[in-house]
Image (cartoon, rainbow, N blue to C red):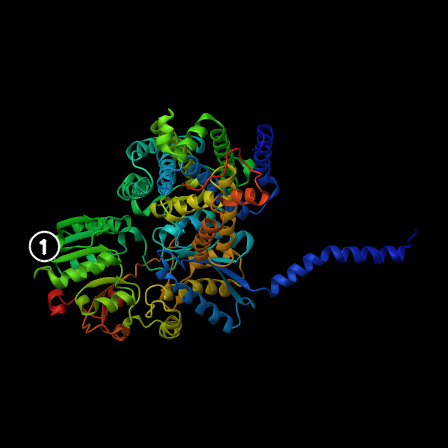
Amino acid sequence: MKINRREFAVLGAGVSAGLAMPAIWTGARAQGQPIRVGCSVSLTGALASTKNSLIGYELWRDDVNAAGGLLGRKVELVVYDDQSSPAAVPGIYSKLVDVDKVDLLFSPYGANLTATVMPLAKQRDRIIIGILTLASNDRLKHDKFFQAAPWGPNGAEDWARGFFDLAIANKLQRIAIIAADTEFSKTAAAGGKRVSEAAGLKVVMNQVYPPTLNDFSAILRNLKAAEPEAVFLCSYPPDSTAMVRGLSEIGVGESVKLFGGGMVGPQYASLLQTLGPALNGIVNFHLYVPEPTLKFQGIEGFLTRYQAIAKERQVDPLGFYIPPFCYAAGQMLSEAVKATGTLEEAKLAQWLHGNPVETIVGKIAFNELGDWTERRVLMAQFRNIAGNDLEQFRQAGKQVVLDPPALKSGDLVPFAKARA
Amino acid sequence: MMRTGTFATIAVLLGAAGFLLPQVVANPYYFYAGYVVLQYIVIATGWNILGGYAGYINFGTSAFFGAGVYTSAYLMQAFEAPLVVQIVAAALVGVALGVATGYLTLRIQGVYFSIATLALVVVLETVVHNTEALGGASGLTTIGPPPPAWFKGQTQYVFCVMLVLALLAVVIARWIETSWLGRGFRAIRASEPAAESCGVPTLRMKLIACAISGGIIAAAGAPYPSYAYHVEPVSAFGLLIALNALAMPLIGGTRSWMGPVIGAVLLGTIQQVATVTISSEYNILAVGLLLIAFVVAAPEGLLGLLSAVRGGVRWSAKPARKPA
């Protein structure tokens, strides 16, 4: 069969168009496709109480999409359940990066889960926002990691430093340090001891207890005998509950003016409701409380919307601890994308390192490790808690911020007086 | 029983195919998922030597796995030991742990032995929690040297290493099944007093079973620090490992080396797919439902079911028995 020049040209053009079509189609499709943001969330397992973080991400996505999306494209979340298991995380993040081809990443919740994804993020040179992780980038020093939580620089040792600063500011001389026998608690306790000794405070008791302990009567009696003025307690929800109950039953002695610091548990509605007035006087860390000094742009509207969804999904009804920081993690990404006009991760990281971001949890600036340049962990004192009604915790004046000074909403009331 | 020549050919071909895979498959995700399935082949095969062949149900698989994980992680951290050394050391620790556990517990039988193995998990996890050199509760970050260039990535490398371990575990299990050891284990499983009266050194045989089983399971844990880059006690001593180690041989069949392999491939794949499709919480549900289904409908596992369907054509030379 012979073909003439015209037929050859038509045939050539047809074949060329056919070969080029997949590329043209894919390119056009990519332009119209949503921007995919991927992460794992602990929907099941030991950390399932943190699954309300998903509401934070969803509300951010909805707000961005309602405002027209990013770079003219909708934002889509790709979320998998990591079962609270670090073993599941590497596979999930490989799926997100290699199969789902997500554009941007949030880390899983907490340090142990995030530790398994950081090497992958560094190897692939991906931008990743850390969700309440602690010291996750200290070793790898990945230049595209950014922290969504306010632990500040040297967070592993200093996240609870506000408590010790309060003791020093209130001229308390004798301090007791009690920590659960876990790395998180012991590191904070060691940091606190260092700060106390540097400031000339006398550490009258320094005790580590097994994480399974649920009877604190012996420790409380030893505390009474040691007559400290400040007691730093670094505990987990079951032991926090046992200690607070022990305080009501046995007491801690008249000498104590400042008690608490690093108790995990009273950040969540379930424990607040259970312990109620027994919390009065305790000064404990938190990341957000509804005080007038923390009226950041958009936080109240966020919490109103969160609380409606939380009721429906039967998760933490207050949502002060994690969800606002997940929303803020999204804002960090969207602000960087808007400012740079690109999804190129090197440019996004460069912009985030160089510019503070306005979020619903305040203005955030990052240091070279991606941690906040300023520690903004709150030390708040429970006051005037009456009964077990959860509604009271939505009001100002129930968790008064004592530290950091810039966000302070009141002064320390001595422990015994606040409980009277 | 598959002929030795055929078995060896298939094993060599699988090994070669696995080592060529990084050159053919570009997407690392399949190696992540494949690693987990292969890891369970090793664990299930190791478990089956004591639980299936000798009939001693071990609920403490995660203790052996965790011991392997931490041996490897410690050697990597403290001495920058290469992966081969980590695996050998982990296997030796597993053997020692198996012998020690066996010696202390094998005089008790049946359900009491199983409960004692559970205690081992609690003991080891508590030791790790309280040992600073092992990272305590927060664990150890374990970033080793880059893998050989051939593998094109760390995940591909640990996948191939786990493939070799899986092949070795299956070879050992098959050898045991056909050797004097297997006959001794089967005698113990059928009736320990009868075996003893026939001259089978039951205590020694059980110690050997514990040692081999422990060594294989611990070796399965050794590449984990290189896979996950971080080890901590909750994952290393996790319930899911013990549950899968038990479920996979039961689903595949405990009488033959092929049973744990089939169970691990089937259940491991279902779990990997469920994690990224339906929901992870269906993982444990899937294991539970499959276990119930097999206990009720096919107590001899898939291989037993197949034999029954074929009307007496057996995979192994042994007659099918009711479970002990």
Residue A330 to residue A215: above or below: below
Classify residue A93 as left or right of residue B112: right
Counting labels gives 1
Residue farthest along the top direction in this orientation: B199
- Viewer-closest of B319 and A29: B319
Q: In terms of depth relative to the viewer, which is nearer, A88 or A23?
A: A88
Disc 1 crowd rating (10 Å Cα; few below 14, some 14-19, many 20+) is some
Q: Give the SS element for disc 1.
A: helix
Q: Which subunit holds the residue at mark 1?
A: A
Residue A358: x, y in percent? Answer: 40, 67
Name the residue: 24% across, 57% down.
Answer: A238
In the figure, residue B231 lies in which quadrant? top left
**Is residue A283 toward the left or the right of residue A357 in the image?**
left
Tag 1: amino acid: Arg
Residue beneath label 1, please?
A221
Q: Is residue A19 above or below residue A320?
A: above
Point out residue A215 in the picture as x, y percentages from the top left corner. Answer: 17, 55
Q: Where is residue B307 in the image (x, y as percent from the top left)?
A: 55, 42
Residue A280 located left or right of residue B274:
left
**Quadrant housing residue A399:** bottom left
Residue A80 makes an appearance in the image: yes
Q: Which of A235 and B252 is in front in this view?
A: B252
Tell me where residue B302 appears, x and y as whole percent: 52, 45
Q: On the rendered image, what quadrant is the C terminus of chain A found in?
A: bottom left
Asked if residue A99 is positioned above or below residue B106 in the image, the reply reads below
Q: Is residue B80 visible?
A: no
- Residue in front for this viewpoint, A273 or B2: B2
